[in-house]
Amino acid sequence: MSKSPRIALIHATPVAMDPIRHAFKILWPEAEPINILEESLTPDRARSAEIPATLVDRIAALAKYGASTGSDAVLFTCSAFGPAIEYAAAKLDIPVMKPNEAMFAAAIAEGGRSAMLYTFPPAKESMEQEFREEAARCGSDAQIESVFVPGAIDAVRQGDVATHNRLIAEAAKSLSGFRSVTLGQFSMARALADVQASTDTPVFSSPEQAVLKLRDLIGTK
């Protein structure tokens, strides 16, 4: 009997958990995702413009723990720790993915200008840098422009998903001249259908694209 691929999901906030669970259920039900939640990461990251060395070490320790569970890959679901996740990935012999890398690859393939809607300000700079580095690696002239959606993350943390989704869809509807739209936080995937209904521009979210990439990388063992 073949073993179901196990994926360690490392979360910094509970609001990221349902979107990635749903993506696995729809796109890769054969996989076995396991949840590792460390809620102190988000407030600690928000206190500093740069990622402190202590947080880099904690991210690496979490990735190592995820691998120790027998997982075939580790996926981080918080977008504010890109460089720290890269550091962690270099220390392990299984895939360790940043939350947005697959989504950005899909947007870059569209070319031109991409709008990144985001709700958590500390993640902005590292995500933009990640996009530019991936575009350069691909030899693409794709560009990113970030658009903050105020109030959305507060709404979803309070359980008001309808307001969260409406605010993000309204922000997407106001965009023009872009070849693609990306949703910068995992928690924003709740709004994917509403955003797609508000614009004719291709819209990508992190959970769906991450699951598709992991499925291609690992498959069913």
Image (spheres, grey):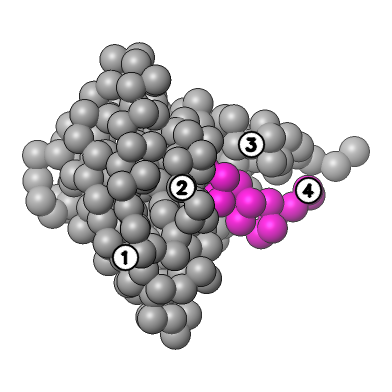
Pointer 4 residue: 220
Locate residue 198, reporting x and y percent. Answer: 45, 41
Using the numbered discs, state the Cα–Cα distance from disc 3 to disc 4 in whole angstroms: 13 Å
Three-letter code, disc 1: Ile
Mark in the foreground, 4 or 1: 1
Secondary structure under the numbered disc 2 in the rendered image: loop
Q: Nearer the viewer, mark 3 or mark 2?
A: 2
- Dominant secondary structure of the magenta stretch? helix
| SS at mark 4 in the image | loop
Q: Is residue 96 left or right of residue 88?
A: right
Q: Marks 3 and 1: CB-CB under 8 Å?
A: no
Task: Name the residue beneath numbered marker 1.
Answer: 144
- At label 3, counting other C-alpha atoms closer than 10 Å, the crowd grade (few under 14, some 14-19, many 20 or more) is many
Image spot of residue 170 (x, y percent): 33, 37
Q: Contact, CB < 8 Å: mark 1 with mark 2?
A: no
The disc, 1 or 2, on the residue closer to the chain's N-terminal end is 1
Answer with mark 3 or mark 1, whichever residue precedes in sequence: 3
Residue to which mark 2 is pinned: 199
- Give the mark, 3 or 4, whose residue is nearer the N terminus: 3
Q: Is residue 86 above or below residue 32?
A: below
Residue at the far bottom: name it.
Answer: 139
Q: Kindly identify the amino acid type of the residue bearing the numbered disc 3.
A: Phe
Q: Which residue is mark 3?
A: 24
Q: Amino acid at mark 4?
A: Thr
Say above or below: 147 vs 179: above
CA gap, disc 1 and disc 2: 18 Å
Which dot, 1 or 2, sits closer to the camera?
2
Q: Residues within 10 Å of mark 2 (few under 14, many from 20)?
A: some
The residue stretch that appears in magenta: 207-221
Residue shown at 36%/64% (left/top)? 177
